[in-house]
């Protein structure tokens, strides 16, 4: 049932291979380890993960969602976990913190961190902008997930002028999220490609 729902949501997302990406080409594989997922409504989180997975699939990034930490996963002793060929990212969902220095931000990433929590998302901030709007919480959460994960994949703190990697989304952007996901621009994909190539080279030494 869950797999069928994911397939359906991916189809609804209407993602296309974009930014010079050849059909079937895989840029990288990523495991995202979620911490604090209990603060999110399961149905909202599930739909957001499915949409985010589809958005990344459109540029050749395969995402696998896990719960817990990479260290705990390795303790399971499964071959596909021990020898996973991709990148591990730890993402924590938290409630808003009074007086937080990142006022207004839905979340933040630490693209230069090699371990520990690399992404923090303020879940209640994600829900706030969709109250009274037509943008579903799952769509906005999906874009927030994709935005912050992309920062880590690119390994650099930067934003694009358009698309999912904009520094701030307008009301028009959020209205579009209801119909179809915001796109990656070519530079977004190029930076992921360069970063992954650099990681592979460092790993092979």
Image (cartoon, grey):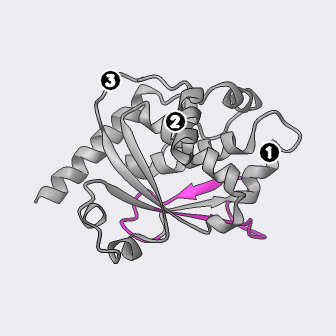
Q: Which residues are magenta?
A: 90-116
Which secondary structure is most common in the magenta stretch? loop
**Residue at 24% from the left image edge and 53% from the top image edge:** 199
Q: Secondary structure at mark 2?
A: helix
Residue 120: image quadrant is bottom right
- As rendered, which of 31 and 190 lies closer to the eye? 31
Residue 23 marker:
3
Residue that badge 2 annotates: 7
Q: Is residue 35 above or below residue 84?
A: below
Residue that badge 1 annotates: 129
- As rendered, which of 34 and 191 lies closer to the eye? 34
- Find the distance from the CA under tag 2 to the CA under tag 1: 28 Å
Residue 3 marker:
none
Q: Residue furthest left?
A: 205
Locate residue 160, reporting x and y percent.
Answer: 52, 34
Q: Is residue 92 visible?
A: yes
- Find the distance from the CA under tag 1 to the CA under tag 3: 35 Å
Q: Mark 2 Cα within 10 Å, few/some/many (few <14, many 20+)?
A: some
Locate residue 70, reporting x and y percent.
Answer: 39, 69
């Amino acid at each position: 049932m869950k797999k069928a729902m994911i397939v359906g949501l991916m189809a609804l997302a209407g993602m296309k291979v974009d930014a010079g990406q050849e059909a079937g080409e895989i840029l990288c594989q990523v495991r995202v380890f979620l911490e604090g997922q209990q603060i999110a409504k399961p149905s909202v989180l599930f739909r957001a993960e499915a949409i985010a997975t589809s958005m990344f699939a459109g540029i050749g990034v395969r995402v696998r969602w896990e719960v817990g930490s990479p260290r705990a996963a390795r303790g399971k002793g499964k071959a596909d976990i021990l020898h996973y060929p991709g990148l591990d990212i730890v993402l924590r969902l938290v409630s808003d913190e009074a007086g937080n220095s990142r006022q207004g931000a839905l979340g933040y990433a630490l693209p230069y961190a090699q371990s520990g929590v690399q992404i923090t998302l303020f879940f209640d901030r994600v829900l706030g902008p969709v109250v009274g709007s037509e943008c579903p919480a799952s769509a906005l959460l999906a874009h927030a997930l994709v935005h912050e994960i992309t920062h880590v994949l690119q390994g650099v703190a930067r934003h694009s002028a358009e698309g999912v990697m904009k520094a701030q989304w307008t009301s028009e952007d959020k209205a579009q999220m209801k119909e179809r996901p915001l796109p990656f621009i070519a530079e977004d994909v190029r930076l992921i490609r360069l970063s992954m190539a650099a990681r592979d080279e460092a790993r092979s030494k």
